[in-house]
């Protein structure tokens, strides 16, 4: 199903977030599995969207699949129901998200971050996530790293502040990250996204449940 314009819940950012909460609590809305990819990251996420004193939160599991042709980010409830899928590539971005009736709708745009904000009411760090989740800045784009040399613990880029809170002992790859974005002058809400990555190659709770 292709949708035109903004999300059908468009009065406020809170009502845009409502379908995600509905999907998290219901047994509807699921997508086909992601195609095999060069690199795949998975784990748990917790997102908090705020404007002023008001906060809305949603949590679940994520999968980020990276290929030379583009990336796919899936957000799902703890039960596996689709919250959002963002696919990027040379042809642009496609975002899929649930409607209030449990059906799935799609939107298209040129910028994944802008499309997420237009449809969902808040930004997602999609355009740089393939690099940030690996603990590095996106090449050829202005960035501030701390410390200046060695493994970065903090990256400021594209309006996001990414803090690497923990790393895997065996590889040194990031294990826990926090992404923060301040509310902007145009009225966009603040955003905090926490990611906790699965141990590479380990079965997840969902995998064990399927077995």
Image (tube, grey):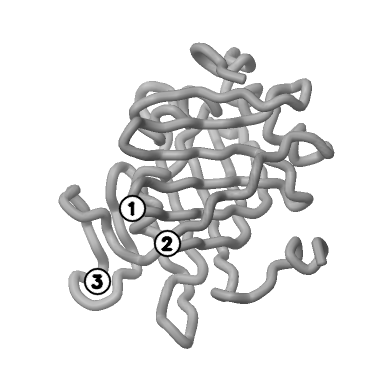
Q: Residue at x 56, y 18 (%)?
A: 2
Determine the residue positioned at 51% across, 62% down: 41
Q: CA distance from mark 3 to mark 1?
A: 29 Å
Residue 6 drawn above or below residue 70: above
On residue 68, the disc is 1
The quadrant in which the C terminus is found is: bottom right
Residue 58, horizontal then vertical, whole percent: 66, 43
Q: Secondary structure at mark 1?
A: loop
- Of circles 3 and 1, which is in front? 1
Q: Report x, y in % for residue 206.
A: 75, 61
Asked whether, in this view, residue 143 is left or right of residue 176, the answer is left
State the SS at label 3.
Answer: loop
Query: Pointers 1 and 2 in contact (CB under 8 A)?
Result: yes
Q: CA distance from mark 1 to mark 2?
A: 8 Å
Mark linked to residue 147: 3
Quadrant where the N terminus sits is top right
Q: Which residue in the protein does label 2 denote?
A: 38
């Amino acid at each position: 199903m292709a949708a035109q314009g903004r999300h059908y819940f468009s009065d406020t950012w809170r009502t845009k977030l409502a379908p995600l909460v509905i999907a998290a609590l219901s047994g509807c809305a699921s997508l086909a599995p992601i195609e095999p990819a060069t690199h795949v990251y998975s784990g748990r996420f917790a997102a908090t969207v705020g404007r002023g004193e008001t906060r809305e939160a949603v949590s679940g599991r994520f999968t980020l699949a990276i290929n030379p042709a583009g990336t796919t980010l899936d957000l799902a409830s703890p039960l596996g129901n689709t919250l959002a899928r963002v696919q990027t590539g040379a042809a642009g971005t496609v975002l899929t998200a649930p409607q209030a009736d449990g059906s799935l709708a799609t939107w298209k745009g040129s910028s994944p971050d802008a499309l997420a904000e237009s449809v969902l009411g808040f930004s997602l760090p999609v355009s740089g996530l393939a690099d940030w989740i690996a603990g590095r800045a996106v090449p050829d784009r202005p960035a501030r790293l701390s410390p200046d040399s060695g493994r970065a613990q903090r990256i400021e880029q594209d309006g996001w502040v990414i803090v690497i809170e923990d790393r895997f002992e065996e590889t040194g790859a990031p294990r826990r990250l926090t992404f923060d974005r301040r509310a902007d002058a145009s009225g966009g809400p603040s955003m905090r996204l926490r990611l906790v990555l699965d141990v590479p190659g380990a079965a997840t709770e969902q995998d064990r449940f399927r077995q």
